[in-house]
Image: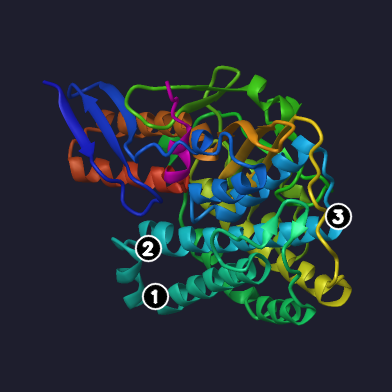
Amino acid sequence: MTREISIDHIARIEGKAGIEVTYDGSQVELVRINVFEGPRYFEAITKGKPVEEATAVFPRICSFCAAAHKVTALQAAENAIGLQPTEQTRLLRELLYIGDYIESHALHLFLLALPDFLGYPDGFSMAEDHPDVIDAGIALKDIGADIQTVIGSRYIHQENAIMGGFGKIPSKESFGTLARRLKMLHGKAEEALEQLVSYPNWREVDAKRTHLALEPYDGSYTMIGDKVKASDGGKFKSDAYQVRIAEEVVPYSFAKHGTYKSQPFMTGAISRFTLFGDGMTGRAGELAETYGSHLDPKNPMSNNFAQSVELVHFVHRAEEIAKNLASDLKPYEKRIEPKVTKGGKGVAITEAPRGLLAYTIEVDKNARVVSADIVTPTAMFLPMMEADLRRMSESLVSSGINEADEIGNKLETIVRSYDPCVSCSVHVADIR
């Protein structure tokens, strides 16, 4: 007799999605993630708009990843018209992006993922027994939001970041304050890692998988670059992503599914760490070396470990950049005014907290958007997530475990280990 396990709403993730599993008592027949967050058509609603206005609209795709979408959209738009920003603009954008990382990783690790490992239904229950852990997470989330507020004028949808530079350059004093606050958070940044190293990955979801990540432009460990590297030895330029990464529509989801060489693939912190972990230096480099055995490229639960080391890395890197800006900032640098004399197409890929984020923007000679294509990390790794849920379901069923609650809790933990952003993924539905 066929049985069904249906999780209508996966708890503690960004957005609305569910899990559906059917099995006949001994064999798993169907496993799929139903994304029913409504489609939002961002590529369509920006068509015909002035490109500068469009770069203000794209970040509305998601409040968690707003800075990631802002910076990536700006890069693609500038590439479309041949605008080269200054080094100071690049540095300010990187720090803005790091603020997004710190806030996003702190939220996920401390409030969404750690309750799974420490045995609590949610962060509020965990806070009763582990107030110091929650305090660390909130302090880190706050500094991430404050970095984005200082540079972008507010912590979501940062309108101060515009094509060619910034509307207003923050003061040197504001970066000095950020640097001092970041230094005081060194210990708290290691709290999540301290908790996670006590818990082994579940071996049921071990499987060989291909990782894709952006090669950092300067050999460090950062989110900016123009080439994508694969763990199978492949490498391609960012503007070739539509050739190398395919998308397809599935009937049960408002999000497309991405594949690389017609196969599911991984992207995210686990992939960055697997391919470019050697770029971590200082305290994060020490921790990466000490606890490197906890990173298993075959297991998605290692994504949480990778995020916890990244949190240490980016707190230190943000402090370093803020110190440099506090001393070397050019406070009166003007933005480069966009000048459009002919149409063009621009591509940019960055590493969002959850993985590769790709933008293509085409503009006409009047600086209006002709077309846009956005591929988000969650849409890329959804097929691999489904494959892992199938592996876990089959292992549990073959072990004689039939309790829906026990199976459901295990499956939800696997989903959360990916840190999916479902809201980001659903804007890519086809319009016919």
What amino acid is found at the position of numbered circle 1 in the picture?
His
- Distance from the alpha carbon under mark 1 to that under mark 3: 45 Å
Decide if residue 286 is on the left or right side of residue 58. Answer: right
Q: Secondary structure at mark 3?
A: loop
- Distance from the alpha carbon under mark 2 to that under mark 3: 46 Å
Few, some or many residues within 10 Å of mark 1 (<14, 14–19, 20+): few
Q: Return the disc, 2 or 3, that comes first in the chain's sequence.
A: 3
In which quarter of the view is residue 142 placed?
bottom right
Which of the pair 114/144 is nearer the observer? 144
The residue stretch that appears in magenta: 423-432
Residue underneath mark 3: 86
Residue shown at the point (36%, 74%) measured from the top left: 127
What amino acid is found at the position of numbered circle 3 in the picture?
Thr
Residue underneath mark 2: 118
In this view, which residue lies farthest toward the top? 262
Which corner quadrant holds the N terminus?
A: top left
The disc at residue 28 is none
